[in-house]
Amino acid sequence: PFGNSNQKSNPAGTMATTLYSDEVRSVDAATEKFASEKGLVLLRPHRACCKAFYFTIPSGCYALVSRHGADEEYVDPTTGAKSIVWPPGLHFPHPPWVRVSNLVTQSAIVFDTPVKACKTKDNVTVNINVALAFRIMGDASAGEDPDLVRRFVHELKPRGLEQQLRDAQDEAVRALARSLMHTEIYGIRSGENLRHIQQSVVGASFDAVGAAASRDAMGAIREEEKVEEEGNGDGNHNHADGDSSMATEASGILGAVPIPPPANRDPPGHRDETLVGTSDERDREAANRARSAGVDVTDYMKQRLNRQFKPQGVEILSIMIESCRLPSDIESQMEEKTKVISKNAQQRMFHQNNMQNTRMEEEVVTLLQTFEEEKMREETSGIEKINEEKVKLNDAIAEARKSEAAIREEAHAKIERLRAENRLEVQRIVSRKEENIAKTRAEAEKEAAQLRAATELEVERKLAEASLTAERNRADASRVTSAAEGVIAPYLARKNVHLTSMKQIDVYKELAANQNVILCDTEDGDANLVAVAESILADAASSGRFGRSAVMAQ
């Protein structure tokens, strides 16, 4: 029930032959419909009953929303910016009378525009198939005006776009065909590398000629366009009337370009004349000129169409001349001519192959002789080099032996020097050892003498203290005896006094007879110690023996 009954959908993978709009049951089916129908540009979706208070917009489409049939602008909730194109996604809530009115595809569309019954410069009818790729503008993220989508939907429309594209393409292609001979028409097909063709077919010297021809042809088309713009002040160009004049000017300009005479050209424009031949030089150069004009005209057509359609919201992405078809009888004549050229080229190749085989055999014999002579020269040269290398080897061996002897002598001297240094170091170590031993022995003997002197002094002091203590004890015993006897007669007292005096006299005699006793007139311990030490040193000096006591006294 939905869709334009007058349009036919194109299967996927083919080019669009017509541009049209259609209706769809709901927005959800828009993406699939755009993908399956190549010429479909505009869709008018219906609103489903289940989506009374919301609607969705699919990605890859420009969406226009209407309220009671009037276009409704979208207001960005964050920035407050307004746009006639609504973004993809869910939009809620909206009343039932707010709906998606139009969906325009954002994808590029390849449109096939064949131009039939074109007349060439020599009045031969040719059919030229041209394809162009375009897209609808209005992407705000790319800096484009979204209002261009509304202008396309309400003003240009798919049918109007198709008609204008066909008219513009028809005018440009017919003007191009009118400027070329039928033998040059195949050269305008797109996909050729112009510079490579110019260098490989006619050499580098033709570059300037082809470029000049292209510039002149484009100049003629631009002049014709200026004349038409001046004659049509309302901006709507009627190109049908200028077709013949433009073709005449372009033909005259291209025909006026001088064709360089055939010549033997070397690289970088070198070509294999065996395969290409030399009898059709002018045809090849004319074909090359046609290629140059075809490439430049497609670029110019793209620029010209963009100037015309961009204000209406359509951008032309590329233009390609797909194919050219001449009448079957003319194609047969050209095919026969090509076969003759190929047959002549084959004969020349066979002849050159035989000549090359002969030359190759002669060159092989010459090379074998040359290689044999070079082999003998190399062998002689090799023997000489071997002798030279042997002499160098002997010199190197002698030098190595001399170096070895010098190294051995130097090593022996180093070893002897190290041994002498080791012996000297051992002697120093032994001397330090004996010195340390002697020093240690002297310190030990000194310490031993000090210990002996201290011991003897202590022994003598202890003996003297013991003798004194014994005498005191005897005196105490006598006093105890006297006290024990009681109150003996005065005789006993006097006797005891006498005996005590005698004992004291004995003690004094013993002390006087003792040579080791030293009498001091002071109770100072340090003075008494000094006196004892001087007596010990005096005795040691008189006897000539310094014992431990003498060392302790010192």
Image (tube, helix red, strand yellow):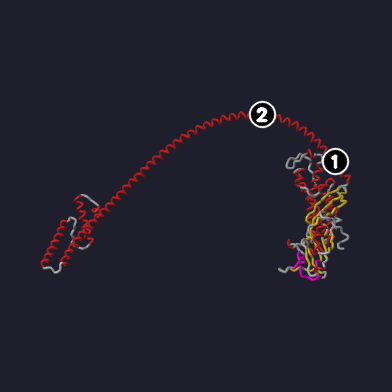
Give coordinates of residue 461: x percent, y percent. 23, 58
**Total of numbered circles in the picture?**
2
Near-viewer residue (229 or 70): 70
* Residue 83 among those drawn in magenta: yes
The residue indicated by pointer 1 is 337
**Kind of residue at badge 2:** Glu
Disc number for residue 372: 2
User: In which quadrant of the rendered image does the C terminus lie?
Assistant: bottom left
SS state under label 1: helix
Callout 1: few (<14), some (14-19), or many (20+) C-alpha neighbours within 10 Å? few
Q: Give the quadrant of residue 91.
A: bottom right
User: In which quadrant of the rendered image does the N terminus lie?
Assistant: bottom right
Give coordinates of residue 318: x percent, y percent. 78, 54
Residue occupying the point 83% across, 66% down = 46
Q: Give the quadrant of residue 516.
A: bottom left
**Kind of residue at badge 1:** Lys
Residue occupying the point 81% across, 37% down = 346
Q: Magenta part of the protein: which range?
A: 82-100
